[in-house]
Image: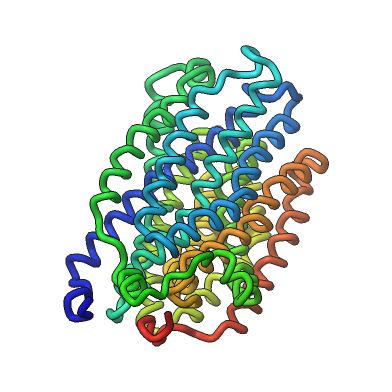
Amino acid sequence: MSESLVVPSAEQIRKVAVASLIGSVIEQYDFLVTGITAATIWGGLFFKLPGLAAVAAAIGVYGLGIIIRPLGAFIFGNIADKYGRKDALVWALVLMGISTLAIGLTPTYASIGVVAPVLLVVFRLCQGISFGAEFGTASTWVVEQAANTKHRAFWGAWVGFAIPIGLILGFTSVLFVKSLMSPADFISWGWRIFFFIGFLVAIVGILIRSRTEDSYLFDKLRDKSHVLDFPAARVWREMPLRIIRTSFVNAMFSGAFFLSFVFGTSYMKAVGFTATQAEVIGLIAAAFMLVFMVIGSLLADKINRRTVLLISAVVFLVFIIPYFYLINTQNIYLAAIAEIIGFGFVFGFGYGAIPTFYTENFPTRYRASGASAGYQISQVYGGGLLPIIAGQILKDLGIHHAYLYIGGIVMVYALAAIIAILMTPDTTKIDMNADY
């Protein structure tokens, strides 16, 4: 294979970026709508528990779907590094579509008793396994395709763009469907519409991804017969410290996402905001997040990855307690400011550099496995463990005291991220062609 024939053109890079974005948006939409319904509806439908205990149980189920992600990262990372990035992402989307449809069809506790939450947990775990494949492999696919450009962070950020776009679609669809029916109908059956839609659009995403070429660097790797037999296991043997160190960085971002999206929605309801107000605030923050993400990606290419990540981490560290204070005022405008800064800026700006940060830290031979592993294990103790802990703290201490403890825990994550960023060499100018 002649390198002059396989170096991607700008149009080929754009096609892979779009395919990755569309598929990731679908996965984000499905996963984020799950978060909305878990925080606001599932407690009363699937768990025979009182008040905040039901909310905590529902958020816990959401968290289980995050805890299982490393398994998906291992399975699909291995597929991506052995057979191709595109193939892994197609099959991951198949699993996401099926499990999302299954959640939409799951009967309630009133219909089948304790079997209902059991089924919900099973399908949620399948969703989590699928989602464990998405970030690391999609980022690898795009960044490798753009390996020879000076805009790797920008192209890699297209994977991240899926998060605010998925949030916007999720919040908008919830508000729209709610406007068409009574609150009772929405709680009874209306919420299921989102999962049926998610299944249908997953089919579209599968078709788009299956018709797109694999990454340039993986084709080179395969052409030179450098594909490993067990890449997902090999990266853990050879680079365990790098996986763990990079995981500390994203643990903070997953914590920010959880605080604002999953826990933040139920917390705002507990404070006194209506579900609709919380969703509108989330929609506004998501729109700002997309803008900040574009800015962050451009600066990551112009300056470097570490500076962008450090700015986000420092802002998160100093703003987390004020974030809760502003929401506790019960003023919708101050709460919106809290979400725009604590979620829109911290998550969005930093995420402009995150996809390239992960992919550039691992060589081509097991890049998808390494990026997926570092990213997804951070979701366990960042995005997965925190919803369970915070839900329990909220139940035990109530809204007036819980935020101080939750905020203190998350500040530890921010400090760990800052240390990890400082300990990781900057990869802005690394030659991704040099190391297989």
Work out which quarter of the rendered image holds the C terminus and state it.
bottom left
Residue 135 in the figure: left or right of residue 222: right
**In front here: 357 or 243?**
243
At 33% from the left and 55% from the top, the residue drawn is: 21
At 49% from the left and 76% from the top, the residue drawn is: 362
Residue 333 in the figure: left or right of residue 209: right
Q: Position of residue 189 (x, y in %)?
A: 49, 18
Residue 154 visible in the shown view: no
At 37% from the left and 42% from the top, the residue drawn is: 169
**In front here: 141 or 261?**
141
Tell me: residue 393, above or below residue 191.
below
Residue 252 in the figure: left or right of residue 9: right
Tell me: residue 295, above or below residue 32.
below
Q: Position of residue 327 (x, y in %)?
A: 61, 48
Image quarter of residue 280:
top left
Q: Position of residue 246 (x, y in %)?
A: 59, 72
Residue found farthest to the top: 111
Residue 248 visible in the shown view: yes
Snapshot colouring: rainbow
How many labels were placed on the picture?
A: 0
Image quarter of residue 13:
bottom left
